[in-house]
Image (cartoon, rainbow, N blue to C red):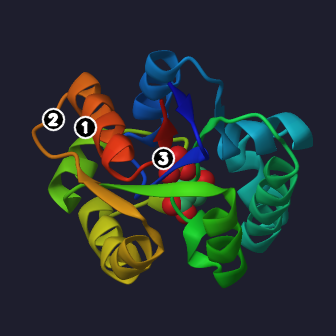
């Protein structure tokens, strides 16, 4: 069985894009790439350092560069993208070109549980985490939905179950050849 296009995972911070991406990559026997890791490698800086020293716009430029670079790659991959990447319209076009876009949807309360105490995400630092999550989630929810070919609800599902559901939906979506 072979994938026809890349599998692109989007969703809010803490929705499980990286862990599910890793699991899918092993189930489908294809490489996994994460745009945040790619940017950290290329710039030699962590995401926090990039935000602190160069600001968010600079980071967003790198996200677009990353997608453009990935489009040049001919082998099929599972690609997890940073939570804010689909917000730029240009990136939405690039995502559609890149492959089948899967939105891992998660409720704000689940997100809160997963990201509380995490210091690696610049947009979620400081006071009132719940309010920050709710504000960004409301702002982005429709963008994720509109940009996706497939939406997968992650609430109450293990990583394995989510990955299996994605594979089943990819088959239904005719993203695999037999
Ligand atoms: C961001 C999400 C992060 C990372 C950066 C900004 C966002 O990635 O790209 O901190 O704007 O939602 P994850 O979604 O992998 O946490």
Measuring from the top left, give residue 169's x and y in whole percent. 30, 46
Label 3: few (<14), some (14–19) or many (≥20) C-alpha neighbours in 10 Å: some
Q: Nearer the viewer, mark 2 or mark 3?
A: 3
Q: Earlier in the sequence, mark 3 or mark 1?
A: 1
The image quadrant in which ligand 1 is located: bottom right
Q: Which residue is mark 1?
A: 165
Say whether mark 3 is within 8 Å of ligand 1.
no
Q: CA distance from mark 2 to mark 3?
A: 23 Å
Which element is circle 2 on? loop
Residue 158, by quadrant, is top left
Q: Which residue is mark 3?
A: 175
Q: Earlier in the sequence, mark 2 or mark 3?
A: 2
Q: CA distance from mark 2 to mark 1?
A: 10 Å
Label 1: few (<14), some (14–19) or many (≥20) C-alpha neighbours in 10 Å: some
Q: Nearer the viewer, mark 3 or mark 1?
A: 3
Residue at point 48%, 29% (across, down): 178
Residue at point 49%, 58% (across, down): 101
Q: Are the residues at dot 2 and dot 1 in contact (C-beta closer than 8 Å)?
A: yes
Q: Is residue 124 above or below residue 113?
A: below
Q: Nearer the viewer, mark 2 or mark 1?
A: 1
Instruction: Specify whether 106 is left or right of 29.
Output: left
Say whether mark 2 is within 8 Å of ligand 1.
no
Q: CA distance from mark 3 to mark 1?
A: 14 Å
Measuring from the top left, give residue 8's x and y in whole percent. 55, 49
Residue 106, by quadrant, is bottom left
Hey, which residue is sitting farthest left in the picture? 156
Q: Which residue is mark 2?
A: 157
């Amino acid at each position: 069985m072979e994938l026809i296009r890349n599998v692109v995972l989007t969703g809010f911070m803490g929705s499980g894009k990286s862990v599910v991406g890793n699991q899918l990559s092993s189930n489908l026997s294809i490489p996994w790439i994460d745009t945040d890791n790619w940017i950290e490698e290329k710039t030699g800086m962590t995401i926090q350092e990039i935000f602190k020293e160069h600001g968010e716009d600079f980071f967003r430029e790198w996200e677009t560069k990353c997608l453009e670079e990935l489009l040049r790659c001919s082998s099929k991959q599972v690609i997890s993208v940073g939570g804010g990447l689909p917000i730029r319209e240009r990136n939405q076009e690039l995502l559609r070109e890149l492959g089948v876009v899967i939105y891992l949807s998660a409720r704000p309360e689940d997100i809160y549980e997963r990201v509380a105490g995490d210091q690696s995400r610049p947009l979620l630092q400081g006071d009132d985490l719940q309010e920050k999550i709710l504000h960004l989630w409301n702002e982005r929810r429709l963008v994720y939905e509109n940009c996706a070919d497939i939406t997968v609800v992650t609430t109450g599902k293990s990583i394995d179950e989510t990955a299996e559901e994605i594979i089943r939906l990819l088959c239904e979506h005719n993203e695999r050849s037999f």
